[in-house]
Amino acid sequence: MQVTSRKFKESAHEAMADEDLRAAMNRIRTAFTTARADAAAELPEFESLRDQAAEIKDHVLDNLDYYLEYFEQKVVAEGGHVHWCSTAEEARQAVLKICRDANARTVTKGKSMITEEIALNKFLASEGIEPIETDLGEYIIQLADEPPSHIIGPAVHKTREQVTDLFHEHHQQYGYQDREEDPEKLVGEARTVLRHKYVTADVGITGANFLIAETGSTVIVTNEGNGDLTQSLPKTHIVVASLEKIVPTLEDASTLMRVLARSATGQEMSVYTTFSTGPKRKDDIDGPENFHVVLLDGGRTEMLGTELQELLRCIRCGACMNHCPVYHAVGGHSYGWVYPGPIGAALNPQMVGIEEARHLPNASSFCGRCEEVCPVRIPLPKILRYWREKTFEQQIGPQPDRWAIEWWGFFAKRPWLYRQTTRLAARVLSMIAGDKGRIRSLPFAKGWTSVRDLPAPEGKTFMEQWKKHNREGR
Amino acid sequence: MSPMSGKIEVALFVTCLVDLNRPSVGFAAVKLLEQAGCRVSVPDAQTCCGQPAYNSGDRKTTRDIAAAVIEAFRGYRYVVAPSGSCAGMIKKHYPALFKDDPDMLLAAEDLAARTHELVSFLADVMDFEPDDVKLDRKVTYHDSCSSLREMKVVNQPRKLLDEVDDLELVEAEDREACCGFGGTFCIKYPEISEEMVDRKIDNLLATKADMVTAGDLGCLMNIAGRLHRRGEKMKVLHVTEILAGMGKERGIGEGDD
Ligand code: SF4
């Protein structure tokens, strides 16, 4: 997908003026946070499960090659294939080759962030293969030709009216002439249209929430059951997954699932959990005849052993964005690449370059709520800070900002000089404010005064009053 | 503890915002600490905890400032700051800054172990309760993010405010949400910060409280500045000022008008 992170400020500005988006973000802010808090409170061992979840992931990351090879052996033993891809391009080509071998005209797709990451839909379409998203949210944004704005709710930014318009525009070809407004009927309409596509699709592509080394299985969790149909009806099933999705055992996957759904939506479990292990066996009544796992590195192994390794624990639950006040304000598209919210702000600079994504780690108040709710305890603020240090070191971003800090630092390191300066500043600011007690506009502090008054200093600094107070004896 | 006075030796980390903008918070802090039985020193060599540089990614300047703070506060039994954010910086982030320098790390960890946020220090360490303080106001308390998440200051200020006569404490919706200050963040991304502080203010106003307080001057200046810009009448004071019986003082950003 086209990267627009550079325009973060402009996109955020537009997003904040969009009333529909504000309403949508308000829903996330209230509904998801309460749901997660309730779910966490109901499970006494939730906090210790989070520790276990993080440990499982850390263990895997420390032994990634071992588990990946183990996984591959198991997949092959079950009759499937594993395609190792270091780059997005390799992954796209691998998928294309499988589709060509299957003579595919249409492919159905379950929800998958990795296929967003490698921009698979556009690519397949350009190769004459029609991709059809089957997750309702993904389907909606596919019709709208937009990227997802949330990792578990790709169309959370869309209002019911907008969906009505989209369906009306795109479903007339299937005989739906009326503008449908009832949400349930809209879902029904999408179901019927998609049902038809399931049975005609030649290839089904899904993502994976987990890859299980001990069994060679891939696991997806959904709330719509679309994943099941996507992978069991077509003759060929392709799982596109990034390599850090691997876990050693079924047991580990279930531990992670227990924190995943609770953190994401407050559910104890997602409605559907689907395991796929190899192609259809002799006695199976259904299932794909070919089973492929396209395993994407996409810059991830580069993160191993660095300050960024902990990001690879992410299980893409979305809790960090659900709880992020910046995400609530600017919505998902402002981040300008596949992953929005705190995880995006921490990950995208690595994926698209810090120069391009420099705003993302900077646009944070470091409130720390993301880290507080992250089921695998990723220290997101620490990683945002890491990127800020990189931008500072590499002199990315406005020079005056860096000068200001260096200039301030010069004084802060010299207490005597600092005292003289602050004494002066306190007086001047207090004089400007006069008897108002606050300043409405200050040329060199526009960032502050553009939206708020500046409460003015009382006039004398604490340190000078304290000295006087001590001199005069207490 | 100083054998001469029998009192507990506390060094006050004034914080740069209190020093420059609202010295009365510093004096309120001194008053409360003395009431609680402490002997208060204010080391002369302090300026700021270094967060402006730290949050801007200037690690070198941050380390220099941190080293100076560590030096300035060597030897005091306790170091107390009227701010969860500055106390959190010293307690949680100084050690991280010196991971690769064993000597400095030791000194940073030593300082971290002695450092406290003021209100929690009064409540937890000194077992202090305000005595004979009265304020006939309906007050809501805003949790600053660093007080809440880094310093785990939640119940202490509420408990102490509860001891103030005639004061009615009410809780706002979504009280764990950030007010949008974030240090340099609010200057670099004013629009996003505005959105955040407006949401915070809407929740504060919905309580029908006539005063908001918190333990961090940064948040309070942000909230007060925006309240004034919106023409709201809610009064803003640092929690230390209320507890020290200075609740009738002019609110933050308030003038004669
Ligand atoms: S960073 Fe943590 S909270 Fe955010 S999506 Fe990943 S696992 Fe969930």
Image (cartoon, grey):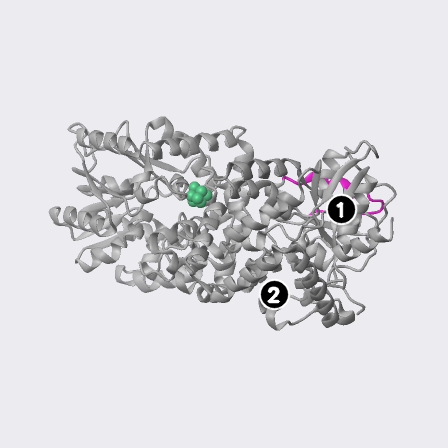
Q: Say left or right for B219 vs A88.
A: right
Does A72 appear in magenta? no
Q: The residue tagged with tag 1: helix, strand or loop?
A: strand
| Number of marks in the rendered image | 2
Q: Is residue A456 visible?
A: no
**Res. B93 mark:** none
Residue at numbered disc 1: B169
Residue at 62%, 38% (x, y): give it.
B112
Residue at 28%, 42% (x, y): give it.
A241
x and y percent of residue B240 in the render? 76, 48
Report the amino acid beneath label 1: Leu
Look at the picture and state if A393 lies above or below A31: below
x and y percent of residue A141 in the render? 35, 57
Q: Chain of mark 2?
A: A
Q: Chain of mark 1?
A: B
Residue at numbered disc 2: A448
Which range of residues does the magenta coloring cover? B152-171
**On the same chain: label 2 and label 1?**
no
x and y percent of residue A362 in the render? 48, 56
Quadrant where the C terminus of chain B is found in the figure: bottom right
Residue at 73%, 34% (x, y): give it.
B125
Residue at 54%, 60% (x, y): give it.
A406
Q: Is residue A390 visible?
A: yes
Does B161 appear in magenta? yes
Report the amino acid beneath label 2: Trp
Q: Quadrant of ligand 1?
A: top left
Callout 2 crowding tier (Cα within 10 Å): few <14, some 14–19, many ≥20: many
Quick one: A408 or A280, which is closer to the camera? A408
Quick one: A24 or B128, which is closer to the camera? B128
Quadrant where the N terminus of chain B is found in the figure: top right
